[in-house]
Amino acid sequence: MDYTNPITTTFELQRTSIEQSQQALQRTVEFQQNLGQAMVDSFETQESAQQRAVELQQEAVHSALDAVEANVPGADAAVSEVREAIDEQYDLLLENHAEAFEALSGEFEDGVAAYDDLVSDYLAALEEQVDMLLEAHEELEAQSVEGAEQLAEQFEALEEQVEDVQSQVRQVQQQAADAVEA
């Protein structure tokens, strides 16, 4: 009878579970890294969209000033001054906007890079630990299988001894029965 098959199967299932857990963790980390990179990539789109919104607002103010200029006689000089002041403010706003996005994007990229480095180191250390765990697990399996085989051998030897004793008892009983009849 093979006593080692359930032991081997149990150890294989445990190793598979450990390996699958490690793979799930790696996929989770990779997802987080991809998410961080997607956020970095989205900064350019967000900046462009916000810049375009500011430019549209500036165009709307220009349209309003054009309407005033066209409909109010003698307002040309005043509208020109207002237009110049507004354009300076919008230029400053767009410049500050670009600087803010550049700083934010740079800081976020640095954070994502630092996170990626940290996670890579963590995953490498985890992989090393899992490899050591699996190696120790395989050693424990080998010892368990060997112990089960030795126990099975001892059981079989004991079983043979019991059969021998039973055979001897039957022989003695038969000799006793023969002696009583004779």
Image (spheres, helix red, strand yellow):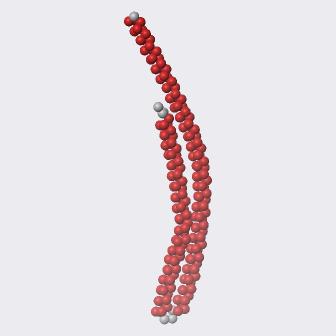
* Position in image of residue 124 (x %, y %): 60, 51
Residue in the picture at 52% in, 55% down: 27
Residue 36 in the image, given as x and y percentages of width and height? 54, 62
Q: Residue at x 50, y 46 (%)?
A: 17
Using the image as rendered, state which of residue 135 and residue 88 is in the foreground: 135
**Picture quadrant of residue 136:** top right
Identified at 56% across, 36% down, the residue is 142
Nearer to the camera, 17 or 46: 17
| On screen, residue 13 above or below 108 | above
Q: In front: 94, or 155?
A: 155
Position of residue 83 relative to residue 138, above or below, is below
Left or right, 4 with respect to 132, comes to: left
Q: How many marks?
A: 0
The percent position of residue 135, horizontal first and vertical second, equals 58, 42
Q: Position of residue 156 (x, y in %)?
A: 49, 26
Q: Residue at x 46, y 15 (%)?
A: 168
Check the picture and name the quadrant holding the C terminus.
top left
Which residue is situated farthest in the top direction here? 182
Rendered view: 179 above or below 20: above
Q: Considering depth in this image, is 180 or 122 the residue closer to the camera?
A: 180
Q: Residue furthest front?
A: 182
